[in-house]
Image: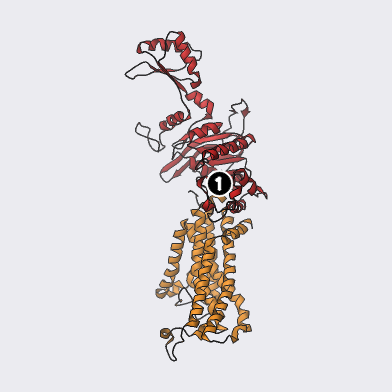
Chain colours: A orange, B red
Amino acid sequence: MRIFLSGMLKLSRRLATWLTFGILLAILGLIFVAVGAAPPPEAGTDPGEGGVDPAVLLAFPTAYDNVIAFILGLGGLLAVIYGAAIAGSEWTWGTLKSAVARGENRTLYVLGTFASIAVVFAIGIVVATAFGVVAALVGGAIAGIPSDGIGDGAALGAIPEKLARVWVAIVGEGALGFAIATLTRSQLAGIGVGVGLFFGGQFAGIFLPDVVQYLPFSAANAVLATDGAGQGGGQVVQALEPNIALLVVAAWLVSALIVASLFTERAEIAG
Amino acid sequence: MLMAPQPWITPDGYERMTYALATRGLSKRYGSRTALDGLDLSVPEGVVYGFLGPNGAGKTTTMRLLTGLIHPDAGSIELLGRPFERGDRRRLFDVGALIESPAFYPYLSGRNNLRTLAATGPTTPAGRVDEVLELMGLASRARDKVSGYSLGMKQRLAIAAALLSDPKLLLLDEPANGLDPAGIVAMRDTLRRLAAAGKTVFVSSHILSEVQQLVDVVGIIAAGRLVREGTISELLHDEGVVRVRVAPGEVEAATAALALLEDRPRVEVGTDAAGGRLTIHVAPSRAAAINQALAERGVYASRVEAGSDLEGLFLQLTAEAPPPDVPAGPSWAAP
């Protein structure tokens, strides 16, 4: 618990936390407001050629799903980077060394630090969702789309479960960045490899869909039963069924934390 | 298992049987390079111990082994009278350490850095963070981000961090790095006070003049091996010399005069072209007595030089030690 609380102190004071969160909010707000401000496509235009119909993205209650799907897609990429930055800095700055030299349990330190990251993700997802809903309302108001469906009971009732799924997915992606940076003992290497795997997985999905759908980032993008609209990381060619995707993501999450813990436990800490 | 400890006679004549820190046959290799080659250290309780050695001699590797950051290939470690093995992390609860450079979160204040560190390892009493900040003269800058600290301030913060758990054994790697003269004096006073309070302070350094003023006992390491260990006065006495220059024709008389001294010191006659140079292996403090002995036999020295200081001894000992993987030879120099 002490390590978790100290992790929260560290993350709350860290520029990377606010920068990552700011990027997510800025892009989210920009997209929803910009779609509302853009002229609607002409009637009969192919959606792929004439831009997005604001009504599809901004009309409630569908807008709830669109906001959450954007957070899942874009948040996943940011989570990889953030997880790698936090884990890598423990090695780069030598702060892990100081904790171990004080007799701290290495595995508990890794897990406590990651637990604080997971809580930061949860807070970030909830706040970003609220912000996205406001952005969708603003975009809708600009486009003249009524917000009648905002109080839709069924849609509102489904939000907690969807956010929980998104949280598991984003925590899983963050854990991969965290584990990669731990293995490479470096912030930059962790971020580079994490981002490379993120986009590499999306690209490989075109050629090896049967395999890639089980890879962490593809599975994470499939935890929500959506049409894929708005997923910032790109659309998965072949997606797992959402509940199976959730299990696959959970397996990747646990595996990543086991790898990070085992490596830290056995590592010779020099430098 | 450690060898039975030998009694240690302190400078004030007390015999100590227990060691705050001891290693036996400690060895560590990095690939094909041997960093430590059977290191035997014996650090008595309640002293300031200076761990000296040239760059690459194995000082930092030793520090890392003593704090469980890395693990030995062979040999054993005893911390505060009990074996320290892989997994014995709780033995470190009574140890404070500064290893290599200070390690902090640059975006946090000095106080918050210590708070995050206090959340690891042993339980730290409330108020201890402010106490050590005050002790190291950082209270007025405690709210500033560490990224704005000078190297000396970071070093003081690192020593404050090492003191957080009020440790019985303090391991400090080059603690004077970056400190200004006033900071060095303050650090020296702090460490001496800690030793006077019964704590053991193990300081690695290459600033020999600083070590000479600070420590009670010295261990000199070269090429991964301990080449000498003892109190400063013992070492300087054992390794001290007085060099005398006399007229070439008086060398024999001088040698005879020195042979009459009560402790019959070893005398080497120089072979340089000028001749008349004698090296007498006695404590440097006996230079006047040597001069007097020569004068009483009618031999008047044209020059008397007393050596060696710690620096001379250090250079002599470390230059003699070959690296573990390289045969001894005149071409080798310490890395």
A69 is higher (above) or lower (below) than A253: below
Is residue B55 at least partly visible in the picture?
yes
Count of numbered tags: 1
Q: Looking at the picture, how far across and down is residue B283, in whole percent? A: 49, 21
Image quadrant for the N terminus of chain B?
Answer: top right
Q: Amino acid at mark 1?
A: Ala
Near mark 1 (Cα within 10 A), the count class, few <14, some 14-19 or many ≥20, is many
A108 is higher (above) or lower (below) than B165: below
Asked which quadrant contains residue B77, the reply is: top right
- The residue at 58%/50% (across/down) is B141
Nearest the eye: A106 or A148: A148
- The residue at 60%/82% (across/down) is A155
Residue occupying the far right of the picture: B126
Image quadrant for the C terminus of chain B?
Answer: top left
With A102 as the anchor, is B320 left or right in this view?
left
Residue occupying the far bottom of the picture: A44
A265 is higher (above) or lower (below) than B230: below
Q: Looking at the picture, how far across and down is residue A167, in whole percent? A: 57, 70
SS assignment at label 1? helix
Q: Looking at the picture, how far across and down is residue B291, in whole percent? A: 46, 14
Q: Looking at the picture, how far across and down is residue B274, in whole percent? A: 33, 17
According to the image, label 1 marks what residue?
Answer: B158
Is residue B85 at least partly visible in the picture?
no
Nearest the eye: B41 or B159: B159
